[in-house]
Every structure is written in C-alpha cells, then in structure tokens.
Image: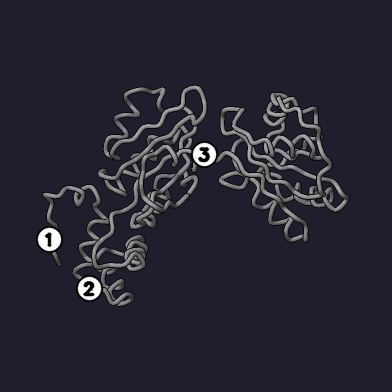
Amino acid sequence: MHIEHPQKLEPVLYVVATPIGNLRDITLRALDVLAAADVVAAEDTRNTAHLLTHHGISAKRLMAVHQHNERSAAEKIIALLQAGQSVAFVSDAGTPAVSDPGALLVQAVLAAGLRVIPIPGANAAVTALSASGLAGPHFLFYGFLPNKSAARRTALQALSTHPYTLVFYEAPHRILECVADLCAVLGGNRQIVLAREITKLFETIHACRLSETEAWLLSDSNQQRGEFVVLVSGAEPQPGLPAETLNTLSLLLEELPLKQAVQLAAKISGANRSELYQNALRMKNPEQHDNPAHSADGE
C-alpha cells in the first residue's frame, strides 16, 4: 500500500508506466505521481481505478483518453495544464504510446509549448526480450502486425532481411495465423520465442524453431490464450550484399516478378545479378532454401 503524503506537482503532463499484469510491478515514483496529480487521464478509467485502490490511493478525478477520443481529449488536457493543473496519463498496461494511446496526446501537449515528463516502468516487449535468450545485440520493435494475412505477409517480407531480433505483439485469436505467416515468409529455421501472459499467473515463455511453433500451440489450446509478445531471431547476414541492397530487392519483389526485380535491383545497387538472383530465390522460397541440401538453379 502506498503511504507517501502527496506533494504538489508542477502543471505538467506525466506519462506514467503501469504494470503489465502483476499489480506490484509499479515504481515508487509512479505511485507518488498518481497520488499527487490533480487529474489522472486513463485509457480505461475502471482499470485505473482498480490500480489506484489496490495501492491505497484515494479517489482522483479520472478522465478517459483512448484511441477514439485522443485528439479531443488532448485539448481538454492542454486547458487543464494551462490552468495550473497537473495531469498523469496511463494506458491500460505498460508504457503509454508504445502500441497504445498516448503519442497524439504527447504531440499536442508539446506543440502547445507545455512540458511532458516520462515516468518509466514496465514494458511487455523489453520484459519478454530480457527472458528470451535471443542473443542478438540489436532488436526491432514492430508492435502489432496487420490483421489480414496478405497485408501481414507484405509487412513481414519488408522485414525479412533485417539482421535484428524482431519483436511483435499479437492477440490470442490471431496467434495461429500470425505464426503460419511468419513461417511462410521468414522460413522455418529461425528461432521464435512466444511470451504470453507475462507477469501473470499463467505466464509462459516458450522457445522453438518457427517450423515447430504451430504444432506446439495446437497441442494445448490453453497456450493460445492471453496477449502475446512474439520474438523472432534476425536474418543471417548474406555474404557479399549489404543490408540496404537486400532491402531494396525485398521491396522490389513485392511489386515485380522475380527476374524483373533482380534486374532493377542490379541497376540500382550495382550488385552482382547472380548474387541478387540467389537471394531473391531465398526470399521467395525461404522454406526450400533453409534446407542445406537444396540447390537452386541459376538464371
């Protein structure tokens, strides 16, 4: 229970990270700000009221700020700040504005010449990454992939040559479709880590090859429940071709037949056509080229 006596805060927008599951995963500084703020702006006022009550923080003035009203709510918050009131903003869970509402609000407050102070704390992507065992030195946080398979595969194709660990969020009702598309586009040999229900009672962190993931999920329907962080190991570097050239080739393959994409990529980059062709084959048929016994024919 929070017992600090609230101190008067500056008329500032405080962007406050809250727990992603376990209600004890909140910083003392966050509790101080939530206790002292004149107004708490929340993505879901019911969830936030529960959090405040759990930590012994008395009833505050709560206002809803979510994806459907963020722009109009920002105007009200700016007026409060200009009137000398302090406002703490929280999303449903984790760090606001990271695959959650908040970015438009912060943008509007800054544009009005007012100050924004971040209060750091829990974040599902970084928490999952810390326990994933994926040792790459860099990661790319993507957030939620598109809902539809065709758009999802297009997005994944653009990411397919990146050597960084890829970090996604996914909902339980789409996890099987998402995993199928990851395997089809990126190939079955990559490592994947599924982190579900992080910090909650049924927390599960499972690592396997992409080709094994669907069977694991289907073996127990309980493993398809809860919100997911999905982490996938990065592409192995292709000798001889820089990442920029491979990205160009990947984008061209989305719009053109393979041979035309290779020809245009060669003109743009000056890279060897034969090397580009072999890489294009790998991008188009990752499953076949993950097999070391497979040998593609040249042009």
Label 2's element?
Answer: loop
Q: Residue at x 28, y 54 (%)?
A: 236
- Image quadrant where one finds the N terminus: top right
Disc 1 and disc 3 in contact, CB within 8 angstroms:
no
Residue under label 2? 272
C-alpha gap between disc 2 and disc 3 = 42 Å
The mark closer to the camera, 1 or 2, is 2
The mark nearer the N terminus, 1 or 3, is 3
The local crowd at label 1, few if under 14, some if 14 to 19, many if 20 or more residues have their Cα within 10 Å, is few
Q: State whether residue 187 is above or below residue 2.
A: below
**Residue 57, quarter of picture:** top right
Disc nearer the start of the sequence (2/3): 3
C-alpha span from label 1 to label 3: 44 Å
Quarter of the figure with residue 119: top right
Mark 1 and mark 2: span between their CA atoms? 16 Å
Q: Nearer the viewer, mark 2 or mark 3?
A: 3
**Residue at coordinates 19% horizontally, 52% vertically from top-left?**
289
Within 10 Å of disc 2 (Cα), the crowding (few <14, some 14-19, many 20+) is: some
Residue labelled with disc 1: 297
Please tell me whether mark 3 sits on a helix, a strand or a loop: helix
Looking at the image, residue 138 lies above or below residue 253: above
The residue labelled by disc 3 is 124
Residue 70 in the image: x percent, y percent? 70, 47
User: Could you tell me if the residues under marks 2 and 3 are in contact, i.e. CB atoms within 8 Å?
Assistant: no
